[in-house]
Image (cartoon, rainbow, N blue to C red):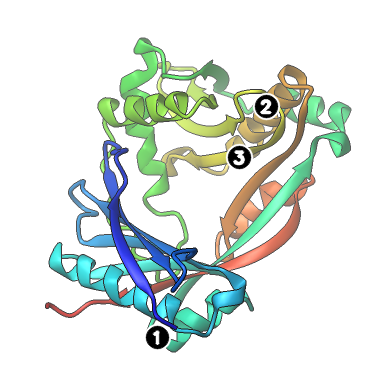
Amino acid sequence: MSIRLTALTDPERTAGSHRLAWLATGPTGAPVGSAFLRLFTTGGQDHLAELEIEVHPAERRTGVGSELLVAALAAARADGRRRVTAQAGTDTPGDGFLAARGFRPVLTLTFARLGCADVDRAALAEAVRQQPPGYRLVSWDGTVPEHLAATFAASRRAMDDMPMDEADHGVVVWDVDRVRAVAEAVERRGELLHTVAAVDASDGAVVGFTELVVPGDGRGDAQHYGTGVLPEHRGHGLARWMKAESVRRAVERHPGLEGLLTDTAEGNRWMRAVNDGLGYLPTHRTRLYQLDLRAP
């Protein structure tokens, strides 16, 4: 099949990345596939690119995906990227496509969902009441309050040692500007960012956090973002405590929500245990693949 690729540029830039795009069309001009290449721009991640390829089911095995891949990898090399990552559902066509083209699997993610109608509110309230000594919970919507901003940004290092098997996510350096930029990006999309944090009662510093992004109309499914506890404060049940409060607030404030979504690395047994204990049920798994690039 004769395929034409049209290179595009996604006009939206974030504080840490921007995207290139390609549209594949067939002989009649009808779209048959697309590719997006996210180029990370912050120090510690500027060797990485993240790839997404989609091909219409009727056009698979006709070379569309391969041509999109060639274009995307050429752009990654030209931009000086050393590694490209891509994700595919286990045992899907994308899974086989990436494996056959030199990508190697480095991480398996388990996706899970908690149906809001299935939440045991009494048990949830009891979990929130189990306050670990020496800590208290705070919460906010959108951008972090000024008096918590510095320690909230510092608490993001809790994610640095998250079990990620062989996956290379680079080194993400967080500061106040970056956490504010993330909140502003969520707001621009018309979504709601809710954060629950654990604070050390002795000095008021944030030592752990969990984030939830809710659709702007408060309906459908919400998506958990990061949950982390600083290493020196682990072992007190803070992750479960924070996430229980996050769920409690979500179902009470947004009665139109249908469910809460989360994903966790297979090797992160601690966070998986928290999710299991709160009633999240696995829905599917994906694999993260990596490809090391040679210079052009």
Q: Quadrant of residue 291?
A: bottom left
Residue appearing at x 52%, y 85% in the figure: 61
Of callouts 3 and 2, which one flags the residue occurring earlier in the amino acid sequence? 3
Q: CA distance from mark 3 to mark 2?
A: 15 Å
Q: Nearer the viewer, residue 11 or 171?
A: 11
Which label number is shown at residue 223? 3
User: Which residue position holds label 2?
Assistant: 245
Left or right of residue 235, residue 25 in this image:
left
- Identify the residue at horizontal 49%, vertical 81% (top origin): 97
Is disc 1 surrounded by few (<14), some (14 to 19) or many (20+) residues within 10 Å?
Answer: few
Q: Give the Cα separation between the discs numbered 2 and 1.
A: 44 Å
Q: Earlier in the sequence, mark 2 or mark 1?
A: 1
Residue underneath mark 1: 101
- Check disc 3 and give the amino acid type: Gln
Is the C terminus in the top left, top right, bottom left or bottom right quadrant? Answer: bottom left
**Location of residue 103 in the rendering, given as x and y in whole percent from the top left corner:** 39, 80
- Residue 193 image point, x, y percent: 52, 26
